[in-house]
Image: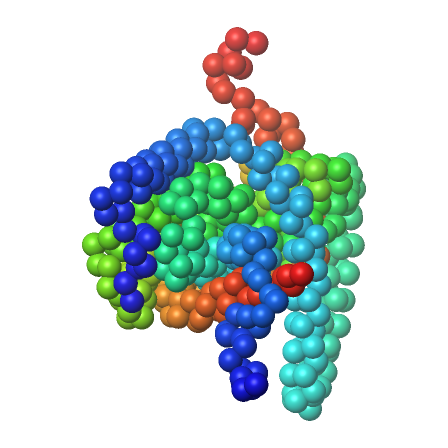
């Protein structure tokens, strides 16, 4: 099929001019886009308000979608559970036995903890979540991994707060608007999280790879002590995340650490909670440039 | 008097007697479909890797290829800006890339005026592949080999989805031009 003849400018001066103007405007548009892109790199927060307002408007739609998503998940779960009921029953019975034993052990450990903490004079405070909300959307086409949360400044959410589900860490608040906020997920390639191994004090960085896995990089290089199946928790270094929250499980060993899978899969979570900054002073001092500190 | 068959009084846009097209519908449907296409991937929750096809972009090039001249050449600026609000890319990336795509498709059309399904799919597929990798390059993160590998399923899905999208756009085009307004 050829384009219809009205699209060909031919000898008509007017048609030629309009074609030329079209190219000119599109070219200027591309230049404007390049300019906006440069501004976005230079000042990443420059368009945060605009984006935030748009997300505020779109969040209710995402809320609806997330209700449908969790609803359909549970329907599927119920159907599969029906088919696996017999096997599951025996497996669960065994699991309950073991869980009872572990529970007793945990009680003993708790007792010991209280005693030791009493000796040290530490007071234990459970952190209250700032807000509990649904994940309403994500950047599912972009190679960056962001999610959007249905709670914002009005609910007390602030930049830098950590977001976790019942299973473990999901990410960190990057931008806040009135009733929604943007979250940097752990799998984003710009996300770095200080972690430690659950069983000992082996400290490492968990970096997102951009393909859904985390790269565990040990801080102390030497013989790689990691084993497949090791669980990593937040270490609390840096001051953003509360220590002791589950992050990832090691699935592959490499020379300088390993590759780990996420424990808290954001697409499988229903509600997430936003927790306040663990050590606001540490974050503040890390953000202050050295020159400024010298002047004061 | 000789009777006409009832089918002769109507064509695929509806009855030809006493009906006309709605100008509002004719102008709104393409833009609305592109905006909805930009918004749809936002409500999907894909945390692990980018899997959803860039629907806004797909719908844009489908309209551009199906109905050359319907969308003005500079349309990438406003529509791209809307897409940037929800895509998670740095603001300006779709403004730039969509404008460049419109110019490129216009040039392909002037160079090869005669075209068919396979050629349309080829140029659309090429545009999709280049768009996804260019969007990755301007996303603000340092591209890694893992990201490139993770993008392959998304690229394949988007390219394979194009014929279906263009069918849907053809259906929307019939809806756009259907004679819905009653005269007199």
Of residues A113 and B65, which is closer to you in this image? B65
Of residues A198 and A237, which is closer to you in this image? A237
- Give the residue furthest to the front: B1
* Place of residue A120 in the rendered image (x, y in percent of width and height, measured from the top left): 73, 38
Q: Is residue A83 above or below residue A50?
A: below
Residue A179 appears in the picture as rendered:
yes
In-image side of A88 versus A16 (left or right): right
> Can you say which quadrant of the picture contains the C terminus of chain B?
bottom right
Q: Which residue appears at 50% of the width and 74% of the height?
A: B12
Residue B140 appears in the picture as rendered:
no
Q: Which residue appears at 52% of the width and 8% of the height?
A: A295
* Place of residue A285 in the rendered image (x, y in percent of width and height, measured from the top left): 57, 24
Q: Is residue A157 above or below residue A4?
A: above
Q: Is residue A126 above or below residue B173?
A: above
Of residues A200 and B42, which is closer to you in this image? B42
Q: How many marks?
A: 0
In-image side of A5 versus B18 (left or right): left
Please say which color scheme the image uses. rainbow
- Give the residue furthest to the top: A295
* Place of residue A170 in the rendered image (x, y in percent of width and height, measured from the top left): 59, 52
Q: Which residue appears at 69% of the width and 77% of the height?
A: A75
In-image side of A143 versus B116 (left or right): right
Q: Which residue appears at 56% of the width and 54% of the height?
A: B23
> Can you say which quadrant of the picture contains the N terminus of chain B?
bottom right
* Place of residue B127 in the rendered image (x, y in percent of width and height, measured from the top left): 32, 56
User: Residue B77 sits in which quadrant?
Assistant: top left
């Amino acid at each position: 099929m050829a384009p219809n003849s009205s699209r060909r400018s031919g000898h008509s001066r007017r048609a030629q001019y309009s074609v030329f103007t079209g190219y000119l405007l599109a070219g200027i548009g591309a230049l404007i886009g390049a300019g906006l892109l440069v501004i976005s790199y230079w000042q990443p927060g420059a368009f945060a308000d605009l984006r935030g307002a748009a997300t505020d408007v779109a969040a209710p739609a995402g809320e609806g979608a997330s209700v449908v998503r969790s609803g359909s998940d549970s329907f599927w779960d119920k159907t599969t559970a029906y088919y696996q009921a017999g096997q599951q029953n025996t497996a669960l019975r065994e699991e309950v036995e073991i869980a009872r034993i572990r529970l007793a052990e945990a009680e003993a450990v708790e007792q010991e903890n209280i005693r030791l903490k009493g000796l040290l004079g530490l007071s234990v405070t459970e952190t209250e979540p700032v807000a509990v909300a649904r994940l309403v959307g994500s950047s599912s086409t972009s190679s960056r991994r962001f999610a959007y949360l249905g709670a914002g400044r009005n609910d007390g959410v602030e930049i830098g707060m950590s977001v976790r589900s019942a299973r473990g860490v999901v990410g960190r608040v990057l931008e806040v608007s009135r009733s929604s906020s943007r979250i940097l997920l752990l799998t984003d390639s710009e996300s770095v999280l200080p972690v430690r191994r659950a069983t000992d004090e082996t400290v490492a960085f968990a970096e997102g790879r951009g393909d859904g896995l985390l790269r565990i990089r040990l801080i102390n290089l030497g013989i790689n002590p990691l084993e497949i199946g090791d669980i990593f928790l937040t270490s609390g270094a840096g001051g953003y995340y509360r220590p002791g929250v589950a992050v990832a499980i090691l699935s592959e060993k490499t020379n300088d650490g390993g590759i780990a899978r996420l424990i808290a899969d954001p697409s499988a979570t229903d509600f997430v909670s936003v927790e306040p900054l663990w050590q606001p002073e540490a974050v503040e001092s890390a953000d202050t440039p050295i020159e400024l500190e010298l002047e004061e | 008097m000789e009777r006409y068959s009832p089918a002769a009084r109507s064509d695929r846009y509806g009855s030809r007697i006493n009906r006309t097209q709605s100008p509002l519908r004719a102008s709104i449907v393409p833009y609305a479909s592109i905006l909805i296409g930009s918004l749809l991937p936002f409500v999907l929750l894909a945390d692990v890797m980018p899997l959803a096809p860039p629907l806004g972009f797909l719908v844009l090039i489908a309209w551009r290829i199906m109905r050359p001249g319907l969308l003005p050449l500079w349309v990438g600026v406003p529509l791209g800006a809307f897409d940037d609000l929800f895509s998670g890319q740095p603001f300006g990336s779709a403004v730039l890339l969509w404008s460049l795509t419109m110019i490129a498709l216009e040039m392909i059309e002037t160079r090869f005026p005669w075209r068919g399904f396979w050629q349309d799919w080829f140029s659309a597929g090429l545009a999709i592949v280049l768009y996804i990798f260019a969007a990755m390059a301007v996303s603000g993160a340092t591209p890694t080999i893992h990201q490139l590998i993770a993008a392959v399923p998304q690229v394949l899905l988007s390219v394979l989805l194009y014929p279906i999208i263009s069918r849907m756009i053809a259906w929307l085009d019939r809806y756009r031009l259907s004679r819905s307004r009653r005269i007199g």
